[in-house]
Image (spheres, grey):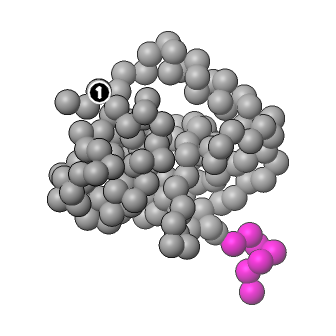
Amino acid sequence: MARTYHPTLFLRGANAVMSLLLRNGVKVGSNALLTVPGRKSGEPRTTPVTPLEGDGERWVQSPYGDVNWVRNLRAAGQGTLTRGRRTEAFSAVELTPAETARVLQAHLSSFPSLVRDYFDVTPESSLEAFEREAPRHPMVRITRTPTPAERP
């Protein structure tokens, strides 16, 4: 049985340290800061995430389930990813469970064991098992939004 996400003091501290490092331009793997407007307040909310890449596409997924940033991103449909001084605006579309399953199956082995503990599948599991697991781990496809200077 996979672990259930409860934001412990350790996890909150780790997120705070990761956010501080990323804000100051320290590259920590492929991590980035995701900023989306709060669905109720409209105020920007920022959290560290690890974007996934493959076949010319990029995704952001939640190993911890339907957490606040997922609900905010669903409501807004857009956000920004920041690494150091580089900020990129994007639009977001949530994937279906079948689409999510294929991406998770291809990338689960690259997740740290701390994160894999939240999944009831292993990298060797069947695609059908990943499809059953996918609804517990929302995933969105992110597409870069051109800046005004880049628009025709």
Q: Is residue 20 magenta?
A: no
| Residue segment shown in magenta | 146-152
Q: Within 10 angstroms of label 1, few (less than 14), some, or many (20 or more) residues?
A: few
Q: Residue furthest front?
A: 124
At label 1, which amino acid type do we have?
Arg
Q: Left or right: 8 with respect to 56?
A: left
* 4 sits left or right of 143 in the view: left
Q: So how many labels did they put on this image?
A: 1
- The residue sitting at the bottom extreme is 152
Name the image quarter holding the C terminus.
bottom right
| Circle 1 SS class | loop
Residue that badge 1 annotates: 3
Q: Where is residue 100 drawn, in percent x and y? A: 33, 59
Q: Residue at coordinates 63% horizontally, 53% vertically from top-left?
A: 80
Say if residue 72 shows up in the picture: no
The quarter of the picture where the N terminus appears is top left
Task: Note whether residue 89 is visible.
Answer: yes
**Residue shown at 65% from the left, 30% from the top:** 18
Residue 136: percent from the left, percent from the top?
Answer: 27, 44
Q: Tell me the residue at 78%/44% (across/down).
A: 84
Between 89 and 139, the residue placed more toward the observer is 139
Which of the two residues, 100 or 121, is positioned nearer the viewer here? 121
Q: What percent of the width, then of the height, locates residue 30?
A: 63, 48
In the displayed structure, would residue 112 be above or below residue 50? above
User: Is 70 in front, or is 49?
Assistant: 49
Work out which residue is located at the far top of the displayed protein and give it: 9
- Residue drawn at 46 percent across, 42 percent down: 111
Residue 147 among magenta residues = yes
Q: Nearer the viewer, residue 90 or 125?
A: 125
